[in-house]
Amino acid sequence: MFAGIDVGGANTKIATSDGFVDSRYAPLWKDKECLYDVLADVKQKFGTELEALGAVMTGELSDCFETKREGVLYIKDALSITFDAPKFFDRNCGFKDSAAVDKDPFSFASTNWLASAKLIAALYNDAIFVDIGSTTTDVIPLTGGEIKAKKTDLERLKSGELIYSGVLRTNVAALLKTVEIGEHGEKCGVSSELFAITADAYLVLGYITEDEYSCESPNSYAFVGREEDEKSRMSAMRRLSRVVCSDLEEIGEDGAVGIAEQVKRAQVDELITSLGRLKEKYGLDMVVSAGIGDFIVQEAADSLNMQFISLSSSYGKKIAATFPAYAVAMLLEKELKGKAFLK
């Protein structure tokens, strides 16, 4: 069995090349030691069946670390202490041992999207690969089976190949500076407080279920002992109402739903801009989508008359949602056993 692990700042995702997937909520910024507990559980689950383990990471950006270097080395140590000889995926799309990480930590920072893009490039030579997760959106141009995106998050943010918003954890105030409220669509400014997140918008609109609301809500501290209420549609609408310093008595359900719809529109429009630029630059007409935000990607692709392929249809929703971990497992198996990729 070959396994891949994607260590993020909020979630650690695990997948095997034969299709097992899991995602553990492990907020490193709160308690970085929780990573050791998650990895120990994973090791116990796999036992002696594990032949090799590959790893990617983005958790090094968590603010529990003073620098990316510190974060990369902490995550590397946690993996190396827990597992025998893990392999780390670098910016050149190769697997290296822990000694290589010690020599050049920056080559292993934020490499999860690269693993996904490497696998997709082998399956779809010419396409734009989009992965919308809980926190970020990767928009990766592929031509002739080669990855054309910049290699660092800073450069990808500059080029529009990384959009720092996702389906669950993004602050609504980071997406909307104004909203239209009421039957006449009056413009209204928004509060910059962390009152509501994208998970609230998509729960209200029906794109995610309460079970798929897998992060903490902004006011989770108020729901200790009654967590089901926290993830209810009514609670999500209350949070959305606060974005305009209001409540449901004042703006009603229609007002809250309207804010949620504008959140979606903002994310679709931002993706349309990025896809349109890359479509024109590279002459690409196909979009391949992973992650949990297919509904956003499809709407953006349709707006640009681009062919849309969802990895959920071929791999299933669970693998598509943890695709970097799955890609690492597949790439490692190919490197060590020469196994061919299949669509």
Image: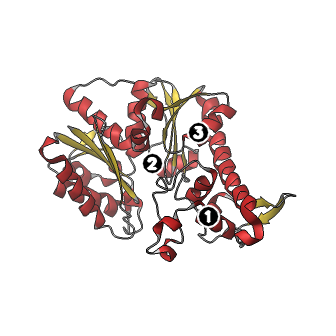
- Image x and y of residue 221, in percent: 48, 75
- Image x and y of residue 268, in percent: 65, 44
Q: CA distance from mark 3 to mark 1?
A: 27 Å
Q: Which mark is residue 4?
A: none
Identified at 52% across, 62% down, the residue is 231
SS class of the residue under badge 2?
A: loop
Q: Which residue is denoted by mark 1 in the rendering?
A: 234
SS class of the residue under badge 1?
A: helix
Relative to 67, residue 16 above or below? above
* First along the sequence among labels 1 and 2: 2
Q: Nearer the viewer, residue 220 or 145?
A: 220
Q: CA distance from mark 3 to mark 2?
A: 23 Å
Is 176 on the left-hand or right-hand side of 216? Answer: right
Among the 4 quarters of the image, the one containing residue 241: bottom right
Among the 4 quarters of the image, the one containing residue 243: bottom right
* First along the sequence among labels 3 and 1: 1
Q: Which residue is denoted by mark 3 in the rendering?
A: 297
Amino acid type, callout 1:
Met
Q: Is residue 217 visible in the rendered structure shown here? A: no
Q: Is residue 272 visible in the rendered structure shown here? A: yes
Identified at 40% across, 38% down, the residue is 116
Is 46 on the left-hand or right-hand side of 176? Answer: left
Which is closer to the viewer, label 1 or label 2?
Answer: 1
Amino acid type, callout 3:
Val
* First along the sequence among labels 3 and 2: 2
Q: Residues within 10 Å of mark 1 (few under 14, many from 20)?
A: some
Q: Which residue is denoted by mark 2 in the rendering?
A: 152
